[in-house]
């Protein structure tokens, strides 16, 4: 694992997120150090994916504070009670990459164009530089020979590997994975996990992963957090949480998915 610092890169402070009358995160406090790899586990609806979506600025929240490397998700000077402007959130979003369950590639664009579009349009990168970076990333995920293909010509596993390359093309400081293998056929899961495993071990990225792949979580994580009803019930080293959990609810969950 890469060296980490004690200063939080990400910090949730008493964040509450509601969908109507349903409270998904309840005064949620959570921090992640620079370079730390954290896996979030728990039953559906426990708030795991909501944490990632809030970090990606895809969901607002009603109470509390959130910062990424000192940048507030609220307008500076407003006092922490109002959602930031789109311009301010876009600045934060440039530091965060996210890989979704369903790939979300543009079907009318080639693999290469899927990867270079955002760096050119959002970061203002020259096309030649963006394409050179894209080729490097495609080599990293083992798909350099597919650069001129369209998503429909790729398997699900290949599409997800392109999605990972696309997220990396923005040079994010934080990379989020929301159940990246849940939409894949079982025989394709391994190729995607292998790419993520290499990212975790070889790059100085801060990573948050939501996954039900417990063996994989044990291999790549510095910390595992068990979520239930909008709170973290138990967290610690993978060996402790996945091997000898103390919380009864954690034990019940792990028993249900490992049986």
Image: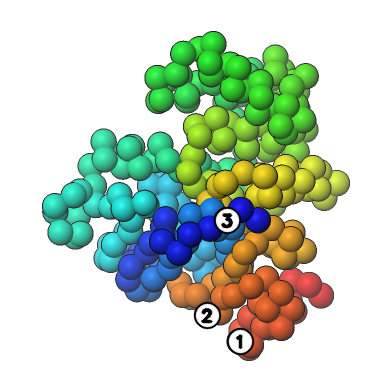
Labels in figure, total: 3
Which numbered marker is on residue 233? 2
Q: Is residue 183 visible?
A: no
Q: Earlier in the sequence, mark 1 or mark 2?
A: 2
Residue, x 53% and y 66% (percent of image)? 45
Which callout, 3 or 1, points to the residue nearer the camera?
Answer: 3
Residue, x 45% and y 72% (percent of image)? 230
Which quadrant of the view contains residue 244?
Answer: bottom right
Closer to the camera in the image, 72 or 7: 7
Helix, strand or loop at label 2? It is: strand
Q: In this rendering, is residue 237 above or below 221?
A: below
Q: Earlier in the sequence, mark 3 or mark 1?
A: 3
Q: In this rendering, is residue 47 above or below 68?
A: below
Which callout, 3 or 2, points to the residue nearer the camera?
Answer: 3
Residue, x 33% and y 37% (percent of image)? 90
Residue topped by disc 1? 247
Image location (x, y in percent) of residue 92: 35, 42
Image location (x, y in percent) of residue 146: 75, 20
Image location (x, y in percent) of residue 25: 40, 69
Q: Is residue 199 visible?
A: yes
Q: Are marks 1 and 2 in contact (CB under 8 Å)?
A: yes
Which quadrant of the view contains residue 256?
Answer: bottom right
Q: CA distance from mark 1 to mark 2?
A: 7 Å
Quadrant placement of the C terminus: bottom right
Quadrant placement of the N terminus: bottom right
Closer to the camera in the image, 258 or 224: 224
Residue topped by disc 3? 3
Q: Is residue 163 left or right of residue 93?
A: right
């Amino acid at each position: 694992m890469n060296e980490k610092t004690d200063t939080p890169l990400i910090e949730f402070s008493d964040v509450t997120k509601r969908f109507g009358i349903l409270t998904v995160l309840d005064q949620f406090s959570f921090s992640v150090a620079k370079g730390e790899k954290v896996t979030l586990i728990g039953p559906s609806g426990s708030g795991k994916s909501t944490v990632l979506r809030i970090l990606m600025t895809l969901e607002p929240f009603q109470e509390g504070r959130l910062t990424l490397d000192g940048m507030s998700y609220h307008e500076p000077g407003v006092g922490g009670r109002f959602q930031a402007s789109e311009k301010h959130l876009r600045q934060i979003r440039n530091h965060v990459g996210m890989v979704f369950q369903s790939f979300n590639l543009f079907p009318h664009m080639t693999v290469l164009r899927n990867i270079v579009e955002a760096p050119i349009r959002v970061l203002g990168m020259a096309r030649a530089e963006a394409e050179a970076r894209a080729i490097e990333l495609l080599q990293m995920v083992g798909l350099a020979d597919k650069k001129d293909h369209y998503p429909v010509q790729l398997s699900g596993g290949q599409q997800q590997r392109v999605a990972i390359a696309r997220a990396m093309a923005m040079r994010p400081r934080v990379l989020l994975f929301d159940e990246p293998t849940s939409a894949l056929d079982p025989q394709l899961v391994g190729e995607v996990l292998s790419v993520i495993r290499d990212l975790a071990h070889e790059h100085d990225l801060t990573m948050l992963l939501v996954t039900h792949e417990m063996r994989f979580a044990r291999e790549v994580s510095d910390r595992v957090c068990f979520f239930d009803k909008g709170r973290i019930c138990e967290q610690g080293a993978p060996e402790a949480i996945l091997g000898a959990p103390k919380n009864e609810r954690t034990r019940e969950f792990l028993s249900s998915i490992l049986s």
